[in-house]
Amino acid sequence: MHNKKYYVSVLDRIKRTQHKTKHNTNKWAKFVYIGKEKNITKLFKETSVKLAFTTKNTISNYLSLKQNQNLKQFEKSGNYQLNCSDCNMKYVGQTGRSCRLRFQEHFRDYKYANNKSKFSIHLMEGRHSIGPMEDIMKVLFTTNQGRLMDTMEKFYICEETRNNNQINDKNTIKPNMIYDVIVRENTRRAHTSS
């Protein structure tokens, strides 16, 4: 290499790194830090095994756990509410499948201008935008298909009709004195607790 005009300092550096790697026979073991590692470190003190400690309590793990818990609600069936992010009108619906699948259908209707969903029609007619599922969808009540799901849907539509901000067909809900009393009582409780 000297005859080929390589610098001697480069050759020396290569030799030193090769020499170090040959003699470095330490092995590393990784442990999750829990706070009582003194006993473990004593066990490996006289060996060629070096210890490295890690933790599972990181910000990214915490945030992904929180996000996964929030997203689990969309995997259930039941009653849901979609909020228009531009005008704050609300659409109440029900699904026997997951709320995530139902949102994807509303999104597809909006994207391809299908006039199948009242929510997508509202967005297209008002030239409003659709937001991400986590921002505009709220799971109101989880249950399987049946009378309870139908009753709860009517109740939530009645509640939004009373607040004068529902997108659903105005003819889908008939006046119901029981719903009116419950909505009025819920509104009164909300005002007195704040």
Image (cartoon, rainbow, N blue to C red):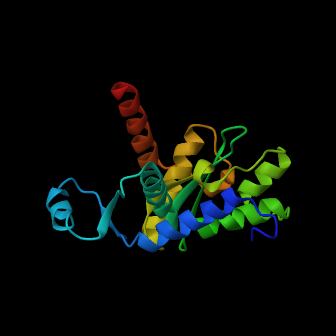
Whether residue 29 is situated above or below residue 194 in the rendered picture: below
Asked if residue 8 shows in the view, the reply is yes
Quadrant the N terminus occupies: bottom right
Asked if residue 76 shows in the view, the reply is no
Whether residue 172 is situated above or below residue 59 in the rendered picture: below
Answer with left or right where residue 9 lies relative to residue 152.
Answer: right
> Percent x, y for residue 49?
30, 70
Whether residue 192 is situated above or below residue 71 in the rendered picture: above
Q: Residue at x 20, y 58 (%)?
A: 37
Q: Nearer the viewer, residue 157 or 98?
A: 98
Q: Residue at x 66, y 53 (%)?
A: 132
Q: Residue at x 69, y 54 (%)?
A: 169
> Percent x, y for residue 130?
73, 50
> Percent x, y for residue 22?
46, 74
Q: Residue furthest front?
A: 3
Q: Nearer the viewer, residue 41 or 137?
A: 41
> Percent x, y for residue 56?
36, 58
